[in-house]
Image (tube, rainbow, N blue to C red):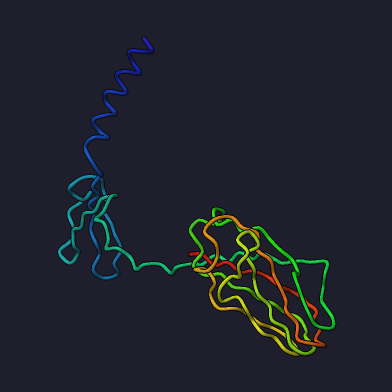
Amino acid sequence: MRLVLAAAVALVAVPALAQGPIVYTGCLKSSDGSLHSVREGAAPMAPCKAKDKQISWNMAGQPGPPGPSGSVSKVLTEIGLISALRGFNGGGGGEITRFLWDPDRYDPTPLEVFLEVYGSVSGSATFRLHDVTHDSDIQGSSMVGSEGVRVRSGNLASSFPSEPAEIALMVDLGQGSSFSIQRSAVLIIQE
């Protein structure tokens, strides 16, 4: 008996859902814009007065026009280049630190990649990124700093390797020069 009753309720409910959106009708009062005599169906509960306007609406409504496109957000990832070696004295130079570059970690592909170095230099120092795996410098990464140093490269995205590689931060010092780094990083910007 319960099964038959449940099936009967289901058969009654299905046609109601298939009819489409429910329409409501009411009277819009011209003096203050309030609604009255609202009822489900094609006619209001009571006829609208002469000064009022009969209106109908449904839950679905008409689709609106497309909205303005949103702003593009960018994601910044920082690879901090940390080294126990904080500086060099007396000229020469060498590797400060290195990191593993793996372009497959970034989706979408980075639009911009920058090298930033903050620190102090006595004399002159040239900072650059070197692809250790392929034994070549990253084109455009060479930056000269003197005295207080705060340098940032141009966009290096097109110069970074397309496959994983070890990248080293290198420094070349002028004769008698020294430096110390307070912060160095590779900044990766994606949309």
Which of the 4 quarters of the picture holds residue 68? bottom left
Question: Viewed as shown, does residue 117 lie left or right of 29?
Answer: right
Which of the 4 quarters of the picture holds residue 187? bottom right
Image coords of residue 72 (percent x, y): 45, 68
Farthest residue to the top: give it: 1
Number of numbered discs present?
A: 0
State whether residue 58 is above or below residue 146. above
Front position in the image: 42 or 52: 42
Image coords of residue 102 (percent x, y): 59, 56
Q: Residue at x 70, y 86 (%)?
A: 145
Image coords of residue 82 (percent x, y): 76, 66
Question: Viewed as shown, does residue 110 lie left or right of 90?
Answer: left
Instruction: Say which quadrant the N terminus sits in.
Output: top left
Image coords of residue 101 (percent x, y): 61, 59
Front position in the image: 119 or 73: 119
Q: Residue at x 27, y 29 (%)?
A: 14
State whether residue 23 is above or below residue 148. above
Q: Residue at x 43, y 69 (%)?
A: 71
Q: Residue at x 27, y 35 (%)?
A: 17
Question: Viewed as shown, does residue 152 lie left or right of 62?
Answer: right
State whether residue 108 is above or below residue 189. above
Front position in the image: 37 or 158: 158
Which of the 4 quarters of the picture holds residue 141? bottom right
